[in-house]
Amino acid sequence: MSDHIWETFDGLFKTVHRQGRRVEELEARITDLERRLQERAAAVSQVQQPKTQSTLSEMPAEQRAA
């Protein structure tokens, strides 16, 4: 009976450890994806920013002042 309890405990411990590693892997993946998303957003804003500046410089002064 005692051996069965220890085997069950061992199995549960290994399962918890395995699940913990999976959670850590998922957290690392989420961090990587968030970083890539921020990099992509920064790249898009850099591309759009010069367009806005060039549009303003092409507008007549009266429209810019309004």
Image (cartoon, helix red, strand yellow):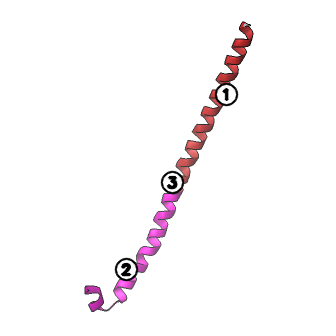
In this rendering, the answer to whether 25 lies above or below 64 is above
Q: Residues within 10 Å of mark 2 (few under 14, many from 20)?
A: few
Q: Where is residue 57 in the image (x, y as percent from the top left)?
A: 34, 86
Q: Mark 2 points at which residue?
A: 53
Q: Quadrant of residue 25?
A: top right
Residue drawn 26% across the image and 86% down it: 66
User: Is 14 above or below relative to 63?
Assistant: above
Amino acid at the residue labelled 1? Thr
Of 18 and 54, the residue lying toward us: 18
Tell us which disc is closer to us: 1 or 2: 1
Looking at the image, which residue is at 40% across and 79% down? 52
Image quadrant in which you'd find residue 53: bottom left
Q: Is disc 3 surrounded by few (<14), some (14 to 19) or many (20+) residues within 10 Å?
A: few
Real-space Cα separation, disc 1 to disc 3, in angstroms:
30 Å
Q: Position of residue 29 (x, y in %)?
A: 58, 47
Mark 1 and mark 3 lie on one chain; the one further toward the N terminus is: 1
Q: Pick whichever, 57 or 12, lies toward us.
A: 12
| Residue 35 badge | 3
Chief secondary structure of the magenta portion: helix
Tag in front: 1 or 3: 1
**Residue occupying the point 55% across, 50% down:** 32
> Is residue 49 highlighted in magenta?
yes
Q: Where is residue 31 in the image (x, y as percent from the top left)?
A: 52, 48
From which residue to which does the magenta span run? 37-66
Label 2: state its secondary structure: helix
Local crowd at mark 1 within 10 Å, few (<14), some, or many (≥20)? few
